[in-house]
Amino acid sequence: MKVYLAGFMSGDKLKETTEWRKAIRTHYAVKAWTDLIWLDPYNGKDIGTITKDGLKSSVPAHAIVHRDYACVRDADIIVANMDTFGSTRPLTGTMCELAWAWQLRKPIILITTDKNYTCHPFMTYFASWIVDSVDTLLKEKIIDYFYQGTVTAKY
């Protein structure tokens, strides 16, 4: 199963924007599910070239959009962290990825406490599941639910 980790990206929030992704991958590394593949917009990018405002890098814009679309298209599930970590810049790329995921009929898990998302009719309709934190996502075994239901049946 392929899981795409969508969310805010910015050079000045690099630590915050990578920590939650690493936490999820690390949690699942101990399960030894060899058919669990993580698709991450940071993969393959020279993250050191992402500007502090998160709007530019050494990778051309078309390449970023095309590669991220391919990841959403190939993913079995999307986990989207809607936290901007204090930045006022909107989640433009993430919102596009969510629209692609919806159009492609991909399950979407939102991580957020923001009422602009938890109460918005589009988000509550699009999302298969909404959780308040990465810890809740892991504790409630939400990725496990999708994995076990789509990879192999065990009774």
Image (tube, rainbow, N blue to C red):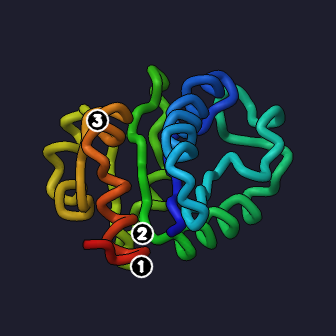
Helix, strand or loop under label 2? helix
Q: Which image quadrant: the C terminus? A: bottom left
Q: Residue at x 32, y 42 (%)?
A: 137
Mark 2–mark 1 Cα distance, whole angstroms, equals 5 Å
Q: Residue at x 45, y 20 (%)?
A: 86
Front residue of 130 and 8: 130
Eye-nearest disc, 2 or 3: 3
Q: Residue at x 48, y 61 (%)?
A: 97
Q: Residue pushed farthest front? A: 155
Mark 2–mark 3 Cα distance, whole angstroms, equals 22 Å
Type of residue at label 3?
Answer: Thr
Q: Residues within 10 Å of mark 3 (few under 14, many from 20)?
A: few
Front residue of 101 and 36: 36
Mark 1–mark 3 Cα distance, whole angstroms, equals 26 Å
Q: Is residue 57 rendered to the left or right of residue 26?
A: right
Helix, strand or loop under label 1? loop
Labels 2 and 1 touching (C-beta < 8 A): yes
Q: To which residue does mark 2 refer? A: 101
Q: Residues within 10 Å of mark 1 (few under 14, many from 20)?
A: few
Type of residue at label 2?
Answer: Ala
